[in-house]
Amino acid sequence: MCVVFPEQEIRQYLSKISRIDHSAYDAFVLVLLTHGNQDGVFGTDASTKDGNETGFILIDEITSMFDSSKCHSLSGKPKMFFIQACQGGKDSSSVLHNAFCFLW
């Protein structure tokens, strides 16, 4: 599924996925395709102003949504996160127009 989401909607969607009952499954795989850096990913509303980034979600925040304390049905099961995040060093207006794609 490919969609275009600003940061808050990405958070809401991943939170919704984490609340699904995963009991019938042996593992969890999440694939994210977006822009970002080594620490996290950008939503479509990403911007940098005066050195401060907005529209940004830390990878640790994403993975923690699926840990056993928050997602009980995945307790003891393998969880794999594949994140393809372009880390271009130049400013690009296309960052705001690219889709946030994920599979689970």
Image (cartoon, helix red, strand yellow):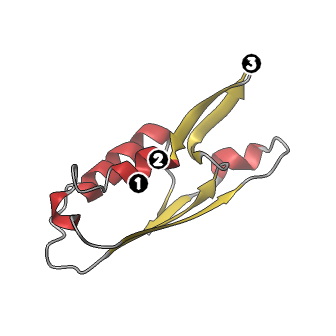
Q: Which mark is residue 63?
A: 1
Locate the C terminus by quadrant: bottom left
Above or below residue 24? Residue 99 is above
Instruction: Name the residue carrying label 2.
Output: 60
Tell whether 23 sits left or right of 68: left
Few, some or many residues within 10 Å of mark 3 (<14, 14–19, 20+): few
- Identify residue type, mark 1: Thr
Few, some or many residues within 10 Å of mark 2 (<14, 14–19, 20+): few
Tell whether 94 sits left or right of 9: right
- Identify residue type, mark 3: Asp
Where residue 54 sits in the image (x, y, percent)? 59, 30
Q: Residue at x 33, y 73 (%)?
A: 78
Q: Earlier in the sequence, mark 3 or mark 2?
A: 3
- Mark nearest the camera among 3 and 1 is 1
Instruction: Name the residue carrying label 3.
Output: 50
Q: Are marks 2 and 1 in contact (CB under 8 Å)?
A: yes
Locate the N terminus by quadrant: bottom left
